[in-house]
Amino acid sequence: MNQISEFHSLINKLIREQQFPSTPEELYAPIEYVMSQGGKRLRPMLTLLACDMFGGKTEDALYPALAIEVFHNFTLVHDDIMDKAPLRRGKETVYKKWNSDIAILSGDTMFAMAYQYAVRTQSAFIPDILDVFSKAAIEVCEGQQYDMNFEQQDDVSIEDYIRMITLKTAVLLAASLKIGAIIASADKKSVQEIYNFGIALGIAFQLQDDFLDVYGDESTFGKKNGGDIVANKKTFLYLKAMTFADKDKARQLHQLYLDKGMNPQEKIEKVTAIFNQLEIEKSVKSTIDWYYQQAMSHLDHCTAPESRITLMKGFADQLYQRNH
Amino acid sequence: MNQISEFHSLINKLIREQQFPSTPEELYAPIEYVMSQGGKRLRPMLTLLACDMFGGKTEDALYPALAIEVFHNFTLVHDDIMDKAPLRRGKETVYKKWNSDIAILSGDTMFAMAYQYAVRTQSAFIPDILDVFSKAAIEVCEGQQYDMNFEQQDDVSIEDYIRMITLKTAVLLAASLKIGAIIASADKKSVQEIYNFGIALGIAFQLQDDFLDVYGDESTFGKKNGGDIVANKKTFLYLKAMTFADKDKARQLHQLYLDKGMNPQEKIEKVTAIFNQLEIEKSVKSTIDWYYQQAMSHLDHCTAPESRITLMKGFADQLYQRNH
């Protein structure tokens, strides 16, 4: 078993081992439900990999890694209420399966549980871990608020969008890595570089998500193309197209996104046609590449054994190449 | 200025001094709104008083005290969504003034901010503070869940009810005190006794709230009697009446609580008449007294200067006698 799949097993084993209280059932059954659904466990993987990269003890990082996974799942439970999302990972969301009161409250409980897990490590690391963790938590909330605001907002700039996804997605990946580095007592510069690696990786990751919605291979990607278009989401592709479009095309695109009654397949085709005319595919790909290269360069500035940096790069590549 | 009003000023000053970020406005305006509304600041007062009682430095306890106040207000913001409460302290609730998405998200942000404040003290205290804080946070969620369950449940026992209010209300008072004691490096036994004092005080406090709804002096208490009756809340008075009532009276009372169309004043009068026939006033008063005496006895078991114990008793008396 290689290092990466070994870490993955460790995390899943730890999650399986957690015994949640049995009462009140309405509170803990949703937590059990959410945590047992699997998923990539990307964030705790980053914590363990970063800890290992800087020579830390994996056992010291396990519970803080779990904390981040629980926190991440808490944000999904609350986001699904706000987004009125019926499904998550192919299963009913907590707010749909139970109700929004239960989703609010079991989410709150998960947030407190995350803090309990975050401090189950050597006490010397606790203050630094909590600084990073709480700051990231607040920023994730800010990102979600901006995301909701953008739905009502017509003048979202590319910079606004990058800031939003930085807060909503990238910051937590970066915090996951930074916490791993803290637990390994990495030097200050490396802690900052691994954080910056996470930010750039997270942006690339989210932009790629936007990209794959339109240009992904449906069979590899595992979901149908065009979901974001049908949902009228102002993704990076839409915003980029808006900056490239002349007045006429911009109006066409804007109209398509205002039309909530159009046949979904027709809408996807029309929007994609405009994207193609504006050569969005190439442009977005090059932006993703740029962020990815930024990420790699931050990694190269970390003080860590070459073999460990290579392992982290390999892990990032895996994420990045999920469409190839 | 006496010690108690001095602590009160310190807390209000600290709250006023907090600078919340200005954007995203939808996230921080509600936090500013909630935190500036005043209130008794009971929980942070308990933290400062407990710290002082055991000879700790007030400055070490200030931010942890603020953490508890922010946490408490976060729970109110989320509870008001679940309870569909339009007003709180005479003002529109966050979910009414903005919307429930914003109430969820600004609440989540407050929870994370509370943790940031909780660790702004000497690092030696942080692990113990966080243990107490996270445990209390989870228990408060459990209490709220039981409270919601009881609305749909016909067989709530007196024991169930006491457990619910212990979790929903008493645990946070107890945690506020315990955190103050931890920051004062109080001995282990005293830390436990002050916690138990808080539990008993919190139960007495909540039972008295139930009591005052029916038997309080409207002019002193500041709200109209009978609100819980009109809302069909299964308070301690109702549950106690149910245990005292014969079959016939129990059915009458049950019917009154099922009748959602009855004129409120008529309903209050009829229910109060049954309470009076069953001598609920006397019985509940004696239960409250019992918890209050329990609380005082825990206080007497603390190792602290007599003058400080007297100060804490005086503060508790003030709370307890708000109806006299």
Image (tube, coloured by chain):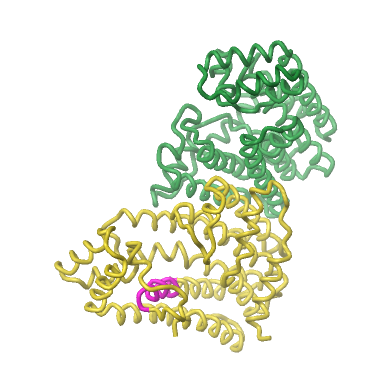
Chain colours: A yellow, B green
The correct choice, above or below, for B275 with respect to B297 in the image is above
What percent of the width, then of the height, locates residue B282? 75, 14
Answer whether residue B238 is magenta in the image: no
State left or right for residue A245 relative to residue B250: left
B16 or B245, nearer to the observer? B245
- Residue A55: x percent and y percent? 67, 79
Give the residue displayed 39% in from the left and 82% down from the top.
A289
User: Going by the picture, which residue comes out furthest to the bottom?
Assistant: A307
Quarter-of-image position of residue A74:
bottom right
Query: In the displayed structure, does residue B298 sit left or right of residue B311?
Result: right
Q: Is residue B264 visible?
A: yes
Residue at the far left in the pictured view? A248
Where is residue A155? Give x, y as percent.
26, 59
Q: Is residue A24 above or below residue A184?
A: above
Q: Quadrant of residue B318?
A: top right
Give, as a single range, the part of the protein colored magenta: A203-215
User: Closer to the camera, A115 or B181?
Assistant: A115
Q: Look at the image and tell me in which quarter the N terminus of chain A lies.
A: bottom right
Residue placed at 70% from the left, 48% from the top? B135
